[in-house]
Amino acid sequence: MKLTRRTFVAASLMCTTLLSAPVAMAEPGAWSDEPVRIVVTFPPGGTSDLVARLVAQYLDTEFGQKAVVDNRPGAAGTVAADYVATQPADGTTFILANNAPFTIAPTRFQTIPYEPVEGFTHVAYIGASAPGLFVQPGLGITSVDDYLAYAKENPPTYGSSGVGSISHILGEAVNAKLDIETIHVPYQGSAPAIQDFRAGVLDTFYDMVVQNSDMIEDKEAVAIAIASPERNPELPDVPTFAEQGYDVVIENWVGLSAPAGLDPAVADQVNETVLAVFALPEVQQRLTDLGITHTAMSVGDYTTFVEEQIDVWKPLIISAGIAE
């Protein structure tokens, strides 16, 4: 048998699976004659959008499954989630799932128009990235302890990508852990917050660390801590909050979910195909560039993960004071 790139990826994935946590065994490949839609909860250009387009590209070129990206932003991701939940469970509609509609919205809002666990077939976990705390270089702050001492004397301003965003929740979690008061300045996305930070309007801001590596390298900002369980290998000099003595771990996860009722055989095939996409070296490199750590999960494990994350985020959201 000729060992093509596709069969090599599939074989490599199978070997990896046998040696690690159990993942559903199915043959990677196209599962629908119709193009599938990957609905994104944010406008074009953000991390979720880039990941969705990466998935769509390689589903087509490597496995012959046509896929398109459909951006439906609004209401903290609940617009897109509600739309996908009401579509036929025929394997042609998916959502690039993330914290906003699935693990934040259930606590943030009194009611949402969908059930975050049972209302979907959670098909494939993709990975997670971590935000961190950036400060102005001129402040002389190089650690969380330095930031604590500064904030006690001079309550700093911090920018976030919006009320209820991960950067906002992290900012309030840090405030609570350090017992400090700060001035929150919400923006419509991280780009305008970073722009104001560069202009000297903000003392600090919270955002994904790896995606701001250029600012760190150019010494335009000092990343004093990342909210991941361990340091990111792309930025090994940025310490975690935990290793500095502050138990703050908040990650932004992404995955692929479909309407409830998707045929289990189709769900397993989609899971295996998505895992095969992320086994490709060029895709792994792109995830690394985006600061995303990929982890393989079965359909069942991913479903359990989403359910558990609701409970993990609930006290953080309540502490941030954004629960309506």
Image: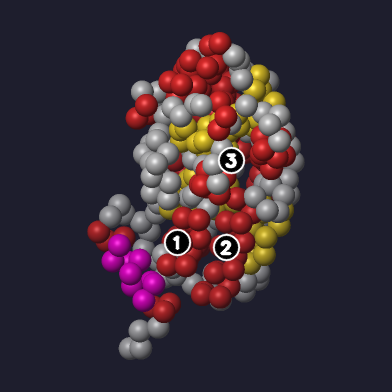
Residue that badge 3 annotates: 220
Q: Decide: few, some or many residues near mark 2? Use Cα within 10 Å; few <14, some 14-19, many ≥20.
A: some
**Is 19 situated above or below 86?**
below
Mark 1 and mark 2 in contact (Cβ < 8 Å)?
Answer: no
Residue at the image position 56 percent from the left and 75 percent from the top: 61
Question: In which quadrant is the C terminus drawn?
Answer: top right
Question: In which quadrant is the N terminus drawn?
Answer: bottom left
Q: Position of residue 117 (x, y in %)?
A: 54, 39
297 and 231: which one is in front? 231
At mark 2, the secondary structure is helix
Amino acid at pointer 3: Glu
Residue at the image position 25 percent from the left and 59 percent from the top: 19
Amino acid at pointer 2: Leu
Residue that badge 1 annotates: 284
- Distance CA(mark 3)–CA(mark 1): 28 Å
Q: Position of residue 149 (x, y in %)?
A: 48, 15
Q: Nearer the viewer, mark 3 or mark 1?
A: 3
- The mark nearer the N terminus, 3 or 1, is 3
Q: Is residue 97 magenta?
A: no
**Is 30 situated above or below 133?**
below
* Residue 162 seen in render: no
Q: Is residue 11 magenta?
A: yes
